[in-house]
Image: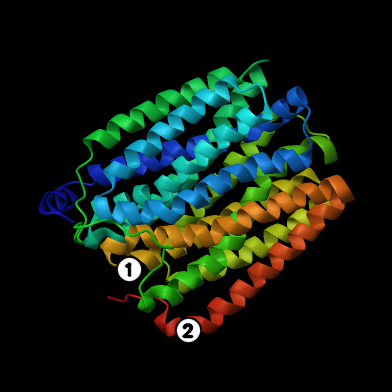
Amino acid sequence: MNTQTQILAAESPAPMLGAAALVTAVFMLSNSPTPLYEHWRTQMGFSSGTMTVIFAVYIAGLLGTLLVAGQLSDRYGRKPVLLPGLLAAILACLLFASAESVVALGVARLLTGIAVGVIVTAGMASVADMGGHARARQAALLASVAMVFGAGLGPLLAGSLAQSMGQPVGLVFGVESLVLVGALIVALFLPSRHPAQASHGALKLRLPSVPSEARRQLVLGISVFGPGITATSFVLALGPSLLSRLLDVHSPLIAGSMACAMFLTATAVQFALGRQPVRTILLVGAAATALAMLSLAVAVNGSIVTALIVASLLAGAGQGLGQLGGLTLIGLNVHGRRRAEANAVLNIGGYIPAGLLPVAAGYLIDLLGMSAAATVFAAGVAAAAIGALAFVRHALPAASSTLRVD
């Protein structure tokens, strides 16, 4: 971190808050389509499997970006990576607003994934940079909360507008475009972060990695974050279909509110447990995901709306705590010059199952029906969460759970 950034971080939290605002803006876009999927499905006539593929195209764009964005950000600085990512998000808004085909939706979701990939690497690393070493845990909490707050605010906005308007798409993404333009202006005025490592010669891209001494900590974070974000991805991709087709609830406002409540829960639990040892954060996160999947199975087999809402809230808690635990471990164990790359590894580990399993569930729904497919999905994710809980208990003895490693 350069001297100017260190001084700013020590004097004022404003740059750290500004960087967090970028995270919130892009994650608003990431989930704004959730309450609108049923609108598009009715308008364009696609299946549950196609719906989850549209969702997964976003994951593909995100994963592809994660392979390179962290390394580019650590090498050349945060701003040269953040600005193109924000421009991709604005272009995605324009495509969503005018989409008349599955292909257009797919391209918009792809660009959204690219923007999110930039934000979870360069954006979250920028929050940590602006916080400085003295605010490492505070910056990790702020970055994580900014992500889940934006992820919840987007579908609430979209659901509210869709509830009151016959053609809400243009207004939803018009508002989101304005938010992103504001974020672009904030990014232009953020202090530049000059990488600590030398930038002489050509960059040789490789698979993202972390220093060997921090790998165990990163695996611990992924083991809890992966099942958690897979559970929330299922709610985002198929929650509206579960509500309308299985539970006979057709309100886009309810669909958007459920997604919003899921991420507000993720925000609240991070504030509630943010000062706890990392071991406690991860254990509670894994347990919450396992309970979420039990509630999901009850909801789809008993046609109980309340159980689905409980499942979404617990899934939000599982993702939020897994994410907070992973980011905290990175902040405490990975040097700033590898931080964005470590963020990329954490998110690759989480988003691969979050992309693949909901798609598989979507096609299983077309083959087996909603109840059977959702039950299979819930069983698989619950098993992964229980395995993560056992792994954390074994790998992190209580006496060493603060993990303050140089």
The amino acid on which the numbered mark 1 sits, given as a three-letter code, is Val
Q: Residue at x 28, y 42 (%)?
A: 80
Q: Which of 198 and 353 is in front in this view?
A: 198
State the residue at coordinates (76%, 43%): 49
- The image shows residue 311 at horizontal and vertical percentages of 69, 52
Q: Going by the image, does 89 lie left or right of 239? A: left
Whichever of callouts 2 and 1 sits on the residue coming sooner in the sequence is 1
Residue at image x 74%, y 29%? 41
- The quadrant of the picture occupied by the C terminus is bottom left
Q: Is residue 250 above or below residue 259?
A: above
Give the residue pinned by disc 1.
334
Q: Name the residue under label 2.
A: 397
Position of residue 334 measured from the top left corner of the image (x, y, whole percent): 32, 68
Q: In this view, does 37 lie to the left or right of 152?
A: right
Q: Determine whether 401 is above or below 170 in the image.
A: below
Place of residue 289 in the rendered image (x, y in percent of width and height, measured from the top left):
64, 61
- Mark 1 Cα within 10 Å, few/some/many (few <14, many 20+)? many
The residue positioned 69% from the left and 56% from the top of the image is: 357
Q: Is mark 1 on a helix, strand or loop?
A: loop
Asked if 178 appears above or below 31 in the picture, the reply is above
Whether residue 128 is visible here, answered yes or no, is no
Residue at far front of view: 202
Between residues 127 and 69, which one lies in front from this camera angle? 69
Quadrant housing residue 106: top right
For numbered disc 2, what is the local secondary structure? loop
Amino acid carrying mark 2 in the image: Pro
Q: Residue 357 carries which label?
A: none
Q: How crowded is mark 2: few (under 14 residues within 10 Å), some or many (20 or more)?
A: few
